Image (spheres, helix red, strand yellow):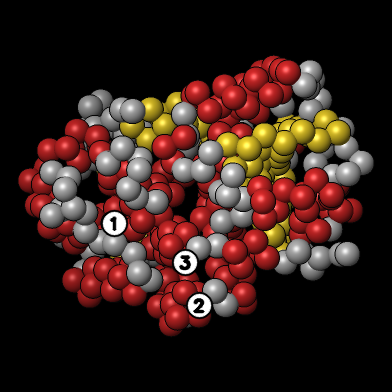
Amino acid sequence: MSATVDTLTVELGTRSYPILIGEGLLRDAALVGRHVPARDVLIVSNTTVAPLYLEALEAALSTRRTVATLLPDGETYKTLDTVARILDVLVANRFGRDCAVAALGGGVVGDMAGFAASVYQRGVAFVQVPTTLLAQVDSAVGGKTGVNHPGGKNLIGAFHQPAAVLADTATLSTLAPRELRAGLAEVVKYGLIHDSGFFAWLETHADALLAGDAGALAHVIRRSCEIKAAIVGRDEHEHGERALLNFGHTFGHAIESATGFSRWLHGEAVAAGMAMAARMSHESGWLGRADLERVIRLIERLGLPTEVEAVSPETMLAHMRIDKKVLDGRIRLVLLRAIGEAFVTAEYDGERLRHTLEAHLR
């Protein structure tokens, strides 16, 4: 069986790699085989995804030696202890430096499998096989890997680019509605930071996206990956422009860590974080009132939160101060001048930040 494939490229010189988007990719053995660069492959998945798609991936790799390891599902397991379990399997099965690790699942699986690949024998090949919308539009692309620490989100990790990203859109048919909505938060982010026309398209196609319309989802996956691939190609290690991809994330990561990584999906926290970042942009005199209202309205229209319960401004600020974008003790924020135009700044009024938090915390 041959799938229809839409291909983009992350341009990183000799380390460039393709993003393949299409329905039924997992069942195209020839395609999968071309993009998994190893004879020995460790498939990392979790207890939710594996019963649905592990057999298909193993069949596509039937000419290779494959070993599968299944992790518990959830952000609370995104830890060094879980990564150690992956490394133990690699060692126990005598995988060499010419092996590959394939991440079959969402962002948590991809982050941990990629981190394990980055440190095993000082780095082995890695392939992303994302099965959630959030992973297909965002986390599977760009080479960020890592785990959480009780003190903060993604504080331990490495940049390790995949050899390929295989985004089979058929996997979205089994995605829970809450997970679909969480993925749409990252899609909204791309419109806000880079493409006002795309944001307007999302406003008019919200119902189709929420209904899981295949054509609408394929469009947002491609456009999101186009934007991220271009930015990563220009700034792989986040020395400048790539920081814009963290719009809403300084607030969102603080929400996740303040609530023990257990109550919020990542996309939900990012949605609330984007609402806070948009309000902070307005409070600071950059973003107009009408644009602020459009941002809040679309987030809510997609069934995503804009407010946070049982977290104080003091707790939020404490967690924001250990964000990776903090420099010289100053929290840097990604804010908006307009929909489609984002920038990074540490030049803002601290009282306005507190007022912003108070407006969204209950």
Look at label 3 and name its amino acid.
Pro
Q: In the shown orientation, is residue 129 left or right of residue 307? A: right
Mark-to-mark CA distance, 3 and 2: 9 Å
Badge 3 element: helix
Query: Which mark is drawn over residue 211?
Result: 2
Q: Are marks 1 and 3 in contact (CB under 8 Å)?
A: no
Taking 107 as reference, is 272 above or below it? below
Which residue is label 1 attached to? 272
Is residue 360 visible to us here? yes
Label 2 vs 1, first from the N-terminus: 2
Q: Residue at x 19, y 71 (%)?
A: 289
Q: Position of residue 30 (x, y in %)?
A: 89, 53
Q: Nearer the viewer, mark 1 or mark 3?
A: 3
Q: Are marks 3 and 2 in contact (CB under 8 Å)?
A: no
Residue at point 47% right, 66% down?
177
Q: In this rendering, is residue 75 above or below 89?
A: below
The residue that mark 3 highlights is: 177
Q: Could you say which quadrant of the image residue 36 lies in?
A: top right
Q: Amino acid at mark 1?
A: Ala
Q: Nearer the viewer, residue 48 or 338?
A: 48
Q: Position of residue 348 (x, y in %)?
A: 17, 45
Circle 3 Cα neighbour tier, 10 Å, few/some/many (<14 / 14–19 / ≥20) = some
What is the crowding at mark 1: few (fewer than 14 residues within 10 Å), some, or many (at least 20)? many
Q: Residue at x 83, y 31 (%)?
A: 40
Looking at the picture, which amino acid does disc 2 mark?
Ala
Between discs 3 and 2, the one toward the N terminus? 3
In the rendered image, residue 90, in percent from the top left (x then y), is placed at 71, 23
Residue at (61%, 67%) from the top-left corner?
Answer: 173
Cα gap from disc 2 to disc 1, whole angstroms: 22 Å
Q: Is residue 154 visible?
A: no
State which tag comes first along the sequence, 1 or 3: 3
